Amino acid sequence: MSYFSGKGFLVTGASSGIGRDLALGLAREGAIVAAMARSEGKLTELAASAPAGRVLPVVGDVASDESTSRAVESAVNACGGRLDGLIHSAGISMSGRVEDVSLDVFREVMETNFFSTIRLVKAALPHIRQQRGHIVAISSIAGFVSYPFGSGYAASKHALQALLDSLRLELAPAGVHVLSVCPGYVRTDIAKNARRADGSKWEQSTKEIENGLDPAVVTRATLRAIEARKRQIAPAGLMEASGKILKPLAPGLLDAVMLKMYARGPLDGA
């Protein structure tokens, strides 16, 4: 029997990308999944693609206190009064020079990628603690290695890493497992949904994203890490993984590599 059989999970960002694939992966392993996202249509499609009765669509916005509380309540009810895990996969990126990017864009990125994690943990933790369950956040290699024109995204992921490290220590005595998943480039819509300096969507992908990992690779690694109660994993290609290694050992070399990689400027070429 699968480790996940009969367990209840709330998965955010479930309408696409890593979140969608994780929701499907958990459902196929026998879990009951409350899948949260803003798009009702995409959640309905997700539920239809999953084993019957395994995915409950929960329409909501992780940036809203009320919406988050309702989502957790719906998840607990859907899972028979229990919640074994939270997987927070909702997130957005941005591209632009610090001097050009609107403060509203920085705030939106931090709200979605960082503050929403605190909001979700506060709402879900009383239930997860009862099960000695799991808190999982999809972070990024950018949580360790910053890059030009992605300052807001990298800052949000660095903050997320610090939050998860503190949470891990605080919740260890209660037997609650905290996992940070730090992928490199993954074939998702994150670049298409990235914010330009003025807050508009980029609406195009990039070569790096298109050549990135399949979300299924991240899902398999994440499910294994949950079962093994690992603290951190970094499913990434060689280029991204080498950046994490180079930063403490040869930061000057890493800077030179970054300058060459991003010589083209931000996504919009500004």
Image (cartoon, rainbow, N blue to C red):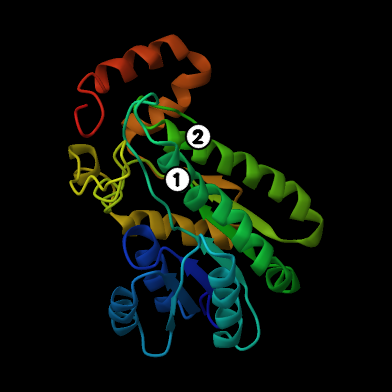
Q: What residue is at 73 percent from the left and 68 percent from the top?
A: 129
Percent x, y of residue 109: 45, 45
Q: Say few, some or many: other residues with alpha carbon within 10 Å of mark 2 (under 14 / 14 to 19 / 20 or more).
A: many
Residue at image point 23% right, 38% down: 208
Q: Position of residue 154 (x, y in %)?
A: 45, 35
Question: Considering the numbered disc 1 on the image, is that residue within a helix, a strand or a loop?
Answer: helix
At which x and y percent is residue 47? 34, 82
Residue 7 appearing in the image:
no
Q: Is residue 120 visible?
A: yes
Q: Nearer the viewer, residue 102 or 83?
A: 102
Q: Which residue is mark 2?
A: 155
Q: Which residue lies at the image location 48% right of the left edge and 20% below the top edge?
A: 247
- Quadrant of the rendered image containing residue 124: bottom right
Q: Position of residue 66 (x, y in %)?
A: 58, 71
Which circle, 1 or 2, is nearer the viewer?
1
Circle number at residue 109 = 1
Left-right relation of 145 to 121: left
Distance from the alpha carbon under mark 1 to that under mark 2? 9 Å
Q: Nearer the viewer, residue 68 or 263?
A: 68
The image quarter in which residue 227 lies? bottom right
Q: Which secondary structure, mark 2? A: helix
| Quadrant holding the C terminus | top left
Looking at the image, residue 186 sits to the left or right of residue 53; the answer is: left
